[in-house]
């Protein structure tokens, strides 16, 4: 009935609403207004900061980073020259030290955390109680307190005099200041060795692929390792002979005050890394426990009914499913660990925060230094997030 | 619709805030002197953890020390006397101290701070007259068998981070071509702990600080301070740059204690001097109608208030760091100029 519809259509009533009453326009307008307000507010803050600092003769000056650092860094660097190393380079050394702590910390905390998380669910009373006690102790005390405790504790239990250092096989020397161990350095001919090992590896992989093809074609067992390992070893031995012993081991030597030569891990590095591992592992353990418990019990019953052993059940049924639930909160703990590494300043570890605060103090450029530092921590955290998001994505439940 | 309204309100609020912000930050007027008077209290930045200079008395909880006494002198100069209300101590670490002055978190800094060109020119702060001439030294355990810095090749040295000391020891060791490891801590007590517990072989700092730390060591007799002095450390008060009225008040408060020692005026005998008929002393103490403190915008007899509160420079020195104190420091460079030292006040007229 088209004519009836036309007759009831009142043009005046259905005229388009004026734009200021149009909800679509109002919403768009308010969003633009909000954006303008945020930008204006942010601009005012920065503008005020810059101008007020300049008025007080403290103008922000990133050129201060080009000046020499002026003092020594005794961590993660040898032959450091304080008069030629710029503040930028010092920051970089600090960042490298932070990464050394964070990288080892992440791996250590994950391994320990998973072990404790599984132990927390053990049917063995002793294992269960010890892990519960561990988790509650480390989760419920501040990390700073733990670091001080660990630092003083390690220091007081180790031998006071360098001459009385514990000697472990290696030889590794342990005392209050550091763990000194032999360093391994390549000689001038070390490249020959590397090249031959590389050739061996390439050839080995080629043989590996060839053997797999033979297996596909004929059904004979591939025995890839029987071909791969001797090939690589042969070339490595040839390289070793040609280079005439390509590595030199340098042992730490006791001098009057300290060990010199070789490599060392300072007590500050050990304390910070260990402290971060112990603290973060407690949180990871609880995440792992929650992830395992979230796997429906029917899955476990089904696995038992199928005759899986406990070990197989954990490895093949429970952990793969738990992993999906564990990854997102685990990423948060990784971020916490990376950021908590800035507590190293409390025990005198030369991480990027410590170096930055020295620069801030020596140049007075606190705003510039802290802006750089925030950028450094932000990009570290974002990098960790990126990796964890990628892992999360690759493990997601695929529904067809 | 409610959501839309809330959103609009929020935007309006942000806009108003951003418009108002430039006006809000426009100058809080007047000198710090006026602000201190209006507030009714002086906020003084001190160390708080350094025996002899600025530390909390474990029995009374009071802030004591050489620097703390200069804070008291300044409060007395402004308010006439020091009460529990008109002087507030703020404890600052080496890393915080100059920022606290820049932010006006403290009115003045008496915190064994070294006056350097870079700090004076770049930090937006000014330094007052040096009230303690110090130099950097090195403290070692006596049984280490070290008699000079040259013997410290390969040693681990504890040092306070964020100070001129870490720069000076670096230069001193590099110049001598010695290898060394610096162990840096944020608190003076941590550096002492490092030495006592064998983390380092030596501890370097201003000699006065070494003496202070040694006095608080478990066994002070175990440590010796090497004879080498590797730097000049003129310790001076600091305040915000660009406030000449306040700068004068701080400066002449320090000079008042020095001039008083020169005249021999002490806490004990100040009343006798008030009756003196020496015109110079009458003028110094603001007696009669000769201008003294009034030129600075203070009570004309502000010197009398200072002396009654803390005594003269010599008294402050002896009480806190002198030979009979736990620090046991000689006057040395800090003797009056007339006794062969560097302590000198400009003419009082």
Image: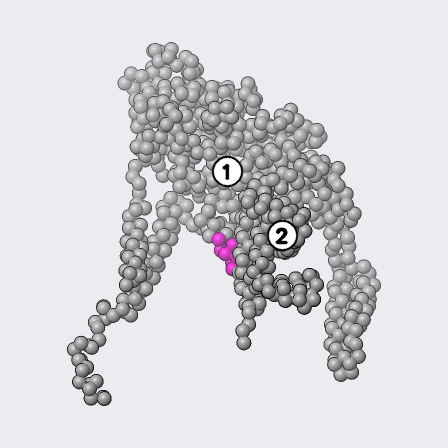
Give the extent of the magenta segment: A374-383
Q: Position of residue B289 (x, y in %)?
A: 27, 18
Q: Which residue is mark 1?
A: B94
Pick the residue in front: A22 or B284. A22
Q: Is residue A218 left or right of residue A56?
A: right
Identity of the residue drawn at 35% across and 50% down: A48
Do tags 1 and 2 sit on the same chain? no
Pick the residue in front: B254 or A383. A383
Identity of the residue drawn at 39% across and 14% down: B270
Identity of the residue drawn at 19% across and 77% down: A15
Pick the residue in front: B201 or B245. B201
* Residue B256 circle label: none
Q: Secondary structure at mark 1?
A: loop
Q: Which residue is mark 2?
A: A120
Q: Position of residue A17 (x, y in %)?
A: 21, 73
Determine if the magenta segment contains residue A51.
Answer: no
Examine the rendered structure and indicate whether residue A110 appears above or below residue A389.
above
Q: Is residue B89 visible?
A: yes
Badge 2 density bin: few <14, some 14–19, many ≥20, Cα 10 Å: many
Q: Position of residue A124 (x, y in %)?
A: 68, 51
């Amino acid at each position: 009935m088209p004519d009836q519809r036309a007759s009831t259509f009142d043009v005046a009533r259905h005229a388009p609403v004026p734009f200021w009453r149009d909800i679509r326009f109002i919403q768009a307008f308010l969003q633009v207004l909000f954006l303008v307000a945020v930008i204006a507010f942010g601009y005012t803050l920065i503008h005020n900061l810059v101008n007020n600092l300049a008025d007080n003769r403290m103008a922000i000056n990133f050129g201060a980073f080009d000046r020499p650092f002026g003092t020594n860094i005794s961590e993660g660097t040898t032959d450091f020259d304080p008069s030629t190393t710029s503040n930028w380079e010092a920051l970089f050394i600090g960042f490298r030290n932070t990464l050394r702590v964070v990288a080892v910390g992440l791996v250590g905390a994950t391994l320990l955390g998973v072990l404790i998380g599984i132990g927390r669910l053990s049917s063995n009373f002793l294992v269960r109680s010890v892990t519960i006690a561990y988790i509650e102790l480390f989760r419920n005390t501040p990390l700073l307190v733990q670091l001080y405790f660990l630092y003083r504790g390690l220091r007081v239990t180790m031998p006071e005099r360098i001459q009385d250092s514990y000697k472990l096989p290696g030889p590794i020397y342990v005392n209050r200041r550091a763990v000194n161990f032999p360093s391994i350095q390549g000689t001038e001919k070390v490249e020959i060795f590397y090249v031959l090992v590389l050739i061996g590896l390439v050839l080995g992989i080629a043989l590996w692929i060839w053997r797999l093809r033979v297996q596909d074609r004929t059904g004979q067992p591939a025995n890839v390792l029987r071909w791969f390992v001797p090939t690589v070893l042969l070339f490595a031995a040839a390289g070793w002979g040609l280079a005439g012993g390509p590595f030199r081991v340098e042992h730490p030597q006791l001098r009057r005050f300290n060990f010199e030569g070789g490599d060392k891990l300072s007590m500050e590095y050990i304390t910070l890394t260990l402290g971060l591992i112990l603290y973060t592992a407690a949180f990871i353990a609880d995440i792992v426990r929650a992830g395992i418990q979230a796997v429906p019990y029917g899955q476990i019953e089904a696995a038992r009914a199928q005759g899986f052993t406990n070990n197989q059940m954990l490895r093949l049924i429970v952990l793969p499913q738990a992993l999906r639930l564990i990854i997102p909160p685990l990423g948060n703990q990784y971020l916490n660990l990376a950021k908590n590494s800035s507590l190293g300043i409390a025990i005198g570890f030369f991480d990027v925060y410590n170096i930055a605060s020295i620069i801030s103090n020596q140049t007075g450029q606190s705003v510039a230094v802290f802006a750089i530092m925030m950028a450094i921590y932000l990009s570290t955290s974002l990098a960790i997030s990126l990796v964890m998001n990628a892992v999360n994505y690759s493990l997601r439940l695929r529904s067809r | 619709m409610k959501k839309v309204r809330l959103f609009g309100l929020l935007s309006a609020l942000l806009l108003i805030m951003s418009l108002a912000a430039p006006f809000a930050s426009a100058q809080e007027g007047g000198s710090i002197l006026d602000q201190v008077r209006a507030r009714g209290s002086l906020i003084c930045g001190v160390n708080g953890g350094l025996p002899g200079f600025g530390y909390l008395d474990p029995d009374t909880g009071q802030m004591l020390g050489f620097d703390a006494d200069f804070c008291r002198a300044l409060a007395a100069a402004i308010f006439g006397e020091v009460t529990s209300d008109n002087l507030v101590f703020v404890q600052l670490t080496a890393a915080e101290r100059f920022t606290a002055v820049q932010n006006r978190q403290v009115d003045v800094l008496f915190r064994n701070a070294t006056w350097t060109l870079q700090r004076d020119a770049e930090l937006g702060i000014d330094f007052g007259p040096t009230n303690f001439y110090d130099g950097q030294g090195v403290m070692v355990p006596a049984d280490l068998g070290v008699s000079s810095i040259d013997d410290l090749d390969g040693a681990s040295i504890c040092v306070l981070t964020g100070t001129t000391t870490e720069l000076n020891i670096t230069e001193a060791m590099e110049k001598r071509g010695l290898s060394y490891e610096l162990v840096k801590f944020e608190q003076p007590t941590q550096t002492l702990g490092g030495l006592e517990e064998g983390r380092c072989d030596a501890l370097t700092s201003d000699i006065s600080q070494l003496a202070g730390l040694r006095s608080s060591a478990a066994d002070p007799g175990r440590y010796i301070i090497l004879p080498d002095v590797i730097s000049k450390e003129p310790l001076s008060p600091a305040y915000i740059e660009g406030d000449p009225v306040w700068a004068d008040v701080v400066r002449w408060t320090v000079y008042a204690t020095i001039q008083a020692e020169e005249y021999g005026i002490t806490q004990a005998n100040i009343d006798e001097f008030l009756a003196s008929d020496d015109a110079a002393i009458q003028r110094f103490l603001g007696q009669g109608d000769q201008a003294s403190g009034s030129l600075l915008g203070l009570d004309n007899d502000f010197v009398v208030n200072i002396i009654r509160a803390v005594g003269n420079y010599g008294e402050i020195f002896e009480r806190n760091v002198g030979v009979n104190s736990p620090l046991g420091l000689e006057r040395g460079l800090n003797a009056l100029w007339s006794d062969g030292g560097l302590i000198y006040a400009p003419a009082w007229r």
